[in-house]
Image (cartoon, helix red, strand yellow):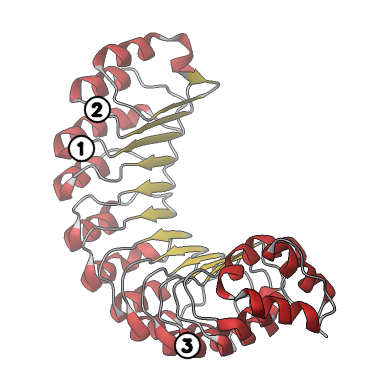
Amino acid sequence: MIKGHSLVLRERLSQATAQQLARDPAYADLEVLDLWSNRLSAKSLAVLLKQPPPGLRELQIVDNNLGPEGARFLAEVLPALPRLERLNLQHNQLGVAGLAQLLGARLDNLRWLGLRENQLGAEGAALLVERAPPALEALHIGANDLGDGGMAALAPLLIRLVELSCGDNHLRADAMAAIAGAARLTTLDIERNLCGPEGARALAGTRAPLHNLDMYYNNIGPEGAEALFGEREHPELQRLHLRANQLGDAGAIALARGSMPKLEILNLEDNTIGPAGAEALARSPVLARLTQLHLHSNKFGAAGVAALITSPRLPRSTRIEVFKVLQHYIPDAQVAELAADRGVELRRDKLETLLAVADAGAP
């Protein structure tokens, strides 16, 4: 089970198996212990961590229903892990009491903390600010019912972070304003908060050097897209996830006017983008460096598909995966017309025809 300096288990862990692992000579040299959904009993956890590997850098105990009692035991063990940098405890029903136990332990080198789905609320957010490990720079705290009040409470901690994941927390404009003040962030995940255009406008105040931005299912609409991207510069942005945001043509046009010279991954699925939006994107420098472009569930129509297929901006290496989607949005007859306009013979396969059309370039 132990490979090199890592142990990864994705199955139920009995006490007998835990004892077997703890006796393995390689166990003492572990740097990564990764236990997801193992239905860990308190006894199994005690066996594994009675004499924890002193060089452990990463500990993942996810979806194991630890509760406050498990947190208390873990807090007793953590001081014996002076090199621990990454601790993931998502979905363990810790509650504020369990979090208090954990943050009472000495965690001087901890840089990454995962607390998603632990029933923390605004009270837990305030406790984090009060007792956060001194080196902490990445926090995953999604699905904890924080609300705007919880995010406001976190504000003094946010300014230290380079990575923040806080989706599924019912965050609106006030929360987005607090996040906008986190000037060191390079990675931000605010998915499924339904912050709307007002939240997008508040977030637009950020000056953080974002590399990764995930805004899946926030319904920012055209107004939010305009505020965040319209003729704005995002010089470091590499990954942008905007699925399910009701962008429409106007939102896509606003996005196309933005400056994102390092963008490599763009997700625009499920945004009701029509021909006008597709045509604006096809002309946009935003496409120039993309390695992935996700376009499912839009309303491009034949004209929009034709514009994207013949786009001079889309890298050739990216086309095939994009065209696999686009081929379902254009009838065979219009593929034939498009091919004829560019002097391309029809292939037996629609995808091959579209690739040939793209290679032929604009008429």
Q: Position of residue 294 (x, y in %)?
A: 55, 66
Q: Which of 301 and 238 is in front in this view?
A: 301
Residue at the image point whose x is 41% and y is 85% from the top: 221
N-terminal of the pair, mark 2 or mark 1, is 2
Helix, strand or loop at label 2? It is loop
Q: Mark 3 points at which residue?
A: 227
Q: Nearer the viewer, residue 36 or 50?
A: 36
* 125 sits to left or right of 25: left
Q: How far apart are marks 1 and 3 (CA)?
A: 41 Å
Q: Position of residue 69 (x, y in %)?
A: 14, 34
Q: How far apart are marks 2 and 1 (CA)?
A: 8 Å
Counting labels gives 3
Label 2 with label 1: CB-CB less than 8 Å = yes
The amino acid at mark 2 is Leu
Q: Where is residue 265 in the image (x, y as percent from the top left)?
A: 59, 64
Label 2 with label 3: CB-CB less than 8 Å = no
Q: Mark 2 points at which residue?
A: 40
Label 1 with label 3: CB-CB less than 8 Å = no
Q: Mark 1 points at which residue?
A: 65
Helix, strand or loop at label 1? It is loop
Residue at the image point whose x is 52% and y is 85% from the top: 274
Above or below: residue 8 compared with residue 211: above
N-terminal of the pair, mark 1 or mark 3, is 1
Quarter that holds the C terminus: bottom right
The amino acid at mark 3 is Ala
Q: Nearer the viewer, residue 282 or 175?
A: 282
